[in-house]
Amino acid sequence: MNNQEQSLKLFVVLSKAYKAIMDGAVKNMKQHHFSETEFTVLELLYHKGRCPLQQIGSKILITSGSITYNIDKLEKKGYIKRVQSADDRRITFAEITEQGTALMDHVFPDHAEAIEQLTASLNSEEKEQAITLLKKLGRSSN
């Protein structure tokens, strides 16, 4: 197999692996009554803390229109709130609420276990190798 054929095969295999793992992850998110985007926004705020609305899309790879819609939905449910920047009125942060934190404290361990099961075919060393190789691939593609 020449280099171009290997590259094409890698692309197909990588795409299929991503789809299989994401399908399993999304299934788990839906069991907790969240869309993929809602869960991903909550997870970001749960782990990283408040985040400017303008940066959320780039951090979780979705469009700004989708962010506004999902932020509105999560805010209506009481899981997040908008907070104006004290330093710059043009910046609005999304911040997880106590209710949102309590919810994620409850559902995230199950989600983490689901991800563990989805990647269980690799041992710890293989996971580290995959992380290193995929980071290298991602950085070289920019």
Image (cartoon, rainbow, N blue to C red):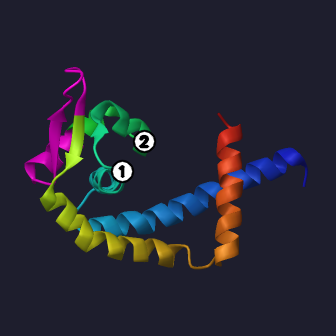
Is residue 32 located in the magenta-colored stretch of the structure? no
Comparing marks 1 and 2, which lies closer to the viewer? 1
Can the viewer see residue 28 in this picture? yes
Residue stretch rendered in magenta on the structure:
69-92
Residue 13 is at least partly visible in this image: no
The image quadrant of residue 125 is: bottom right
Q: Residues within 10 Å of mark 2 (few under 14, many from 20)?
A: few
Which residue is identified by label 2? 59
Q: Quadrant of the N terminus?
A: bottom right
Q: Is residue 124 left or right of residue 35?
A: right
Please report contact status of discs 1 and 2: CB closer than 8 Å, yes or no: yes
Q: Hey, what amino acid is under mark 2?
A: Lys
Q: Earlier in the sequence, mark 1 or mark 2?
A: 1
The residue identified by callout 1 is 48
Q: Residues within 10 Å of mark 1 (few under 14, many from 20)?
A: few
Residue 86: give x, y in percent of width and height.
19, 27
Q: Secondary structure at mark 1?
A: helix
Q: Horizontal and vertical percent for residue 59?
A: 42, 42
Quarter of the image where the C terminus is located: top right
